[in-house]
Image (cartoon, grey):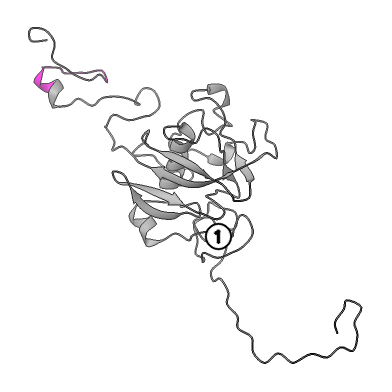
C-alpha cells in the first residue's frame, strides 16, 4: 500500500531494476574491516571505517607500501610515496590519526610513514626522514583517532603517544592510546587526508633513535683528511692539515 499501516493503493509495476555491488571483502585498502589488514576490495561508498577505502594497488607494491591505510599510492620525493584519501581519510585498525603534531618533520608523521612502509611489527631498514608530513582533511566527519598530541622526545608518553619517539623494529602500533590522552578517551579529530613519506638509505644522515640517529657516515672527505672514526660528525678541513 501507501502507508505504514497498509491500504489498498495500487501503483504501476516495476518493469526493470539495475544493480551494482562493491566486490571483495572488508573494504580493502590494506585496511580490512577496520584498517590495517591487507586485503582485496573496491573503492566505494560505505560507513566508517570500511567506506571509501582504496585497495592495495600495483603502484603501492612497487613503491614498497605494506599498508596503504585506505589511501591511494603515488610516488613522492626521492624513492618515497604519498598516501591520499579525500572522502574519509587514512586510517588504521578502525581509527584515524591525531590532527595535532602531524606537520612535516613531526615524529607522528614519520612514524605513520614507517607503519605504512613496513606494516605493524615490521623490521625498519631505511628510517623515515624529516621530509615526512601529513595534512588533515577538512569537510569530512571527525573520527576517533590514535593519540599523537604530545611533545617530541616525551619519554614518559612513549608507550601511549605516537609523537613521543621514533618507532623501532618490531613495534606494535596498537599499544598507542586512542583519543587525546594516554588514558584514552572518545575525542574525535579531523581525519588525515594526505601523508607524504620519504626514507633515508641505511648509513645515511637521518633521524633515528640514539645512538644511530643523526649520524654522518664516514665519507670521502673524512677519509681524505685522514679521519679513521668521525664519531658521527661531519668532516671539514681545518687549519694546517687538520
Q: Residue at x 36, y 22 (%)?
A: 211
- Mark 1 crowd level (few <14, some 14–19, many ≥20, 10 Å Cα): many
Nearer to us in this view, 70 or 212:
70
Is 1 placed left or right of 226 in the picture?
Answer: right
Seen in the picture, residue 174 relative to 215 is either above or below; the reply is: below
Seen in the picture, residue 64 relative to 167 is either above or below; the reply is: below
Write down the residue under mark 1.
Answer: 52
**Can residue 86 be found in the magenta stretch?**
no
Q: Residue at x 16, y 17 (%)?
A: 236
Nearer to us in this view, 189 or 68:
189
Q: Residue 192 location in percent, x, y?
A: 53, 45
Nearer to us in this view, 87 or 183:
87
Nearer to us in this view, 141 or 148:
141
Q: Residue at x 59, y 58 (%)?
A: 50
Q: Range of the magenta residues? A: 223-232
Q: Residue 118 location in percent, x, y?
A: 42, 45
Q: Place residue 157 in its image quadrant.
A: top right
Residue at the top extreme, as displayed: 240
Q: Residue 24 location in percent, x, y?
A: 53, 69
Q: Residue 133 location in percent, x, y?
A: 43, 38
Is 141 placed left or right of 118 in the picture?
Answer: right
Q: Place residue 123 in its image quadrant.
A: top left
Seen in the picture, residue 138 relative to 2 is either above or below; the reply is: above
Circle 1 sits in a helix, a strand or a loop, which is it? loop
Is 182 placed left or right of 32 in the picture?
Answer: right
Helix, strand or loop: magenta stretch? loop
Q: Residue at x 13, y 23 (%)?
A: 221
Amino acid at each position: 500500500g501507501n502507508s505504514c499501516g497498509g491500504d489498498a493503493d495500487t501503483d504501476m509495476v516495476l518493469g526493470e531494476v539495475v544493480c551494482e555491488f562493491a566486490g571483495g571483502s572488508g573494504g580493502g585498502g590494506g585496511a580490512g574491516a577496520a584498517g590495517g589488514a591487507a586485503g582485496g576490495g573496491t573503492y566505494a561508498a560505505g560507513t566508517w571505517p570500511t567506506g571509501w577505502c582504496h585497495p592495495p594497488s600495483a603502484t603501492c607494491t612497487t613503491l614498497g607500501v605494506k599498508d596503504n591505510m585506505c589511501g591511494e599510492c603515488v610516488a613522492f620525493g626521492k624513492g618515497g610515496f604519498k598516501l591520499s584519501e579525500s572522502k574519509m581519510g587514512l586510517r588504521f585498525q578502525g581509527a584515524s590519526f591525531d590532527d595535532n603534531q602531524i606537520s612535516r618533520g613531526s615524529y607522528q608523521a614519520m612514524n605513520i610513514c614507517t607503519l605504512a612502509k613496513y606494516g605493524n611489527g615490521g623490521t625498519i631498514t631505511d628510517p623515515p626522514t624529516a621530509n615526512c608530513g601529513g595534512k588533515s582533511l577538512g569537510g569530512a566527519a571527525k573520527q576517533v583517532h590514535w593519540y599523537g598530541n604530545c611533545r617530541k622526545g616525551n619519554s614518559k608518553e612513549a608507550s601511549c603517544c605516537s609523537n613521543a619517539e621514533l618507532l623501532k623494529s618490531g613495534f606494535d602500533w596498537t599499544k598507542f592510546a586512542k583519543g587525546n590522552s594516554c588514558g584514552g578517551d572518545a575525542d574525535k579529530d579531523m581525519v588525515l587526508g594526505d601523508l607524504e613519506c620519504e626514507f633515508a638509505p641505511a648509513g645515511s644522515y637521518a633521524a633515528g633513535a640514539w645512538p644511530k640517529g643523526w649520524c654522518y657516515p664516514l665519507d670521502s672527505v673524512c677519509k681524505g683528511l685522514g679521519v679513521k672514526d668521525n664519531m658521527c660528525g661531519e668532516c671539514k678541513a681545518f687549519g694546517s692539515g687538520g
